Image (spheres, rainbow, N blue to C red):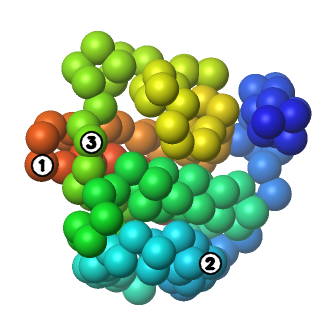
């Protein structure tokens, strides 16, 4: 938790112009994140449906890897065993869109207002490990890339997040 707090504090004072950015294949980075998390999704026997357009973007590779690891890790953590996980990356003219959908307990309507706030945890039982910093870090990283993250849907059947990041030329 201390490392997350330090990273969030550092990011809060960072401007986009101060980010070290390179051009890289974001689809390959997402594949790496999926493979890195394989022990977790394999333990839950999740079926992965993956559709990744080949796309290069300019951004901070380590920070964006944190985004994919966090979002995919959360989706796995909150998925029901033997359900499915959909991971989609779409390449558009001026942006990319990453959506991740899991099938498990929905996020309550009241909690949906706070999920990107520091230290907020929807799982009040604390049955799942976490410190409530992951999504606030993700949001800040996406904002530093002039992007957005939204919870598109959370109901009895699925929870879906979408990240949109503009492509830099």
Question: In the image, is 19 to the left or to the right of 75?
Answer: right
Q: Which residue is mark 3?
A: 105
Residue 84 placement (x, y as % from top left): 24, 70
Image quadrant where residue 103 sits: bottom left
Q: Earlier in the sequence, mark 3 or mark 1?
A: 3
Q: Which numbered dot is residue 139?
A: none
Q: CA distance from mark 3 to mark 1?
A: 8 Å
Front position in the image: 137 or 127: 127
Where 117 falls versus 70 (above or below)? above
Residue 80 placement (x, y as % from top left): 29, 57
The kind of secondary structure element at disc 2 is helix
The kind of secondary structure element at disc 3 is loop
Q: Which residue is mark 1?
A: 157
Q: CA distance from mark 2 to mark 1?
A: 26 Å
Where 5 falls versus 101 (above or below)? above
Q: Which residue is mark 2?
A: 36
Neighbourhood count class around disc 2 (C-alpha, 10 Å): few under 14, some 14–19, many 20 upward: few
Count of marks, rendered view: 3
């Amino acid at each position: 938790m201390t490392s997350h707090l330090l990273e969030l504090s550092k990011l809060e004072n960072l401007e986009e112009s101060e980010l070290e950015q390179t051009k890289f294949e974001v689809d390959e980075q997402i594949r790496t994140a999926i493979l890195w998390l394989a022990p977790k999704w394999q333990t839950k026997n999740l079926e992965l449906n993956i559709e990744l357009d080949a796309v290069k973007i300019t951004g901070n590779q380590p920070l964006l890897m944190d985004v994919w690891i966090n979002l995919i890790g959360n989706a796995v953590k909150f998925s029901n065993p033997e359900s499915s996980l959909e991971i989609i990356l779409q390449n558009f003219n001026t942006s990319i869109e990453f959506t991740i959908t899991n099938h498990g307990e929905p996020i309550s309507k009241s909690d949906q207002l706070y999920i990107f706030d520091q230290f907020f945890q929807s799982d009040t039982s604390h049955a799942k490990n976490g410190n409530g910093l992951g999504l606030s870090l993700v949001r800040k990283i996406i904002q530093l890339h002039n992007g957005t993250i939204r919870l598109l849907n959370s109901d009895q059947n699925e929870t879906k997040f979408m990240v949109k990041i503009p492509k830099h030329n």
